[in-house]
Amino acid sequence: MGSGKADEIKLVVAEHGAQCVIFDQALGPAQQRNLERHLGVEVLDRTALILEIFAARARSHEGKLQVELARLQYLSTRLVRRWSHLERQRGGVGLRGGPGETQIELDKRMIVVRIKAVKERLDKVKRQRGTQRKARERQGTFRVSLVGYTNAGKSTLFNTLVKAQAYAANQLFATLDTTTRQMYLEDAQRSISLSDTVGFIRDLPHTLVDAFQATLQEAADADLLLHVVDAASPVWLEQLREVQRVLHEIGAGDVPQVLVFNKLDAIAPDQMPRLPGDLYEIEPGRVVPRWFVSARTGEGLGALRQTIAEAALAQARSEGPDRSDPRFDPDRGDADFEVDDTTPERVETLLTPPVA
């Protein structure tokens, strides 16, 4: 950005009495400092804005720790003498003594110490989540995770499927904390675990991906991903591709997927899909099932539940007998697990790994 554009922005700030200027891109520490001095107001870049939203949304202890870690990592690169108190101090007693630590060095040291402490606490959370996942694995629980772009309706779909009351709102990053509930599938005669995870966004900062590793691990360890897409969004294809990119980044790119095109009730009548579901090439050489649903009205959810049940049955068939949930059928005991041979062949497509 040249000085002419900066002067133009300064005029707009003065005209509207703005107290903050937000740039939809990453700014370097020196750029941010110089713009604040020139404009005379606070300047935030894309990463800082996302962090502010995350800080406002975090509710659980884990979520607050993850946001704090991301903010500290971001702040550690921003100590570039933006404040007048970052001047050299003098060491020694009285008026004698050599130069001591600068305030910027003290701040950096305190941030490093705090980052270390937060990481240690998050490692403990990660171990606890790992213990919970291992327990579900021992029980043979089929694990399903909801993933997708932020504000695609994941939490609303989660609440509808498991009859829960998780927080859902028409806002960015309404969900930061992973919520897991049991879901009973009549078609499969067994229960599965369904997890609602944090939403993704374009140009998601790497500091956030690193900080939320414990939460995002739920998606990487899932047996099936329900990739929720806002079907009413004019940029749904770009959002879908961005989610795929992040999934590969966190190690969940090869997990079987079902595309769930949500918000069918918000689509214009002339743009409604001709079929309730089809197959979609999500990546070159990789085709997955796609269903059009409305989490708000419940339309299309029956077919989605059946697809999840078929995937759970296919896994049970591949792993052998005794994979049913005896809590829902006590008469079965240790009887062999029987699978209907008429299971649709599209389940095989669902469980086929992507072509390299």
Image (cartoon, rainbow, N blue to C red):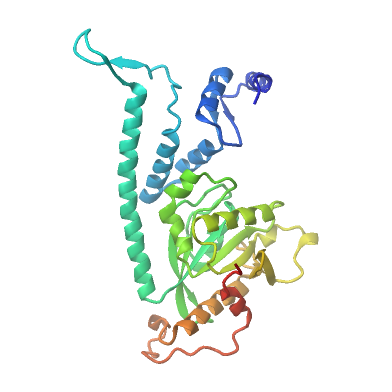
Left or right, 334 with reference to 348: left
Quarter location, residue 44: top right
Left or right, 270 with reference to 225: right
- Residue at 40% across / 77% down in the picture? 140
- Residue at 32% across / 26% down in the picture? 106
- Residue at 77% across / 69% down in the picture? 274
User: Which residue is situated farthest in the right direction here?
Assistant: 270
Q: Nearer the viewer, residue 167 or 343?
A: 343
Residue 37, percent from left and from top: 54, 18
Location of residue 277 with respect to 66 vertically, above or below: below
Residue 290, percent from left and from top: 65, 68
Quarter location, residue 8: top right
- Residue at 34% across / 16% down in the picture? 88
User: Which residue is situated farthest in the left direction here?
Assistant: 93
- Where's the C terminus, which quadrant? bottom right
Residue 232 visible to the viewer: yes
User: Which residue is situated farthest in the top direction here?
Assistant: 95
- Where's the N terminus, which quadrant? top right
Residue 178 visible to the viewer: no
Location of residue 63 with respect to 283 vertically, above or below: above
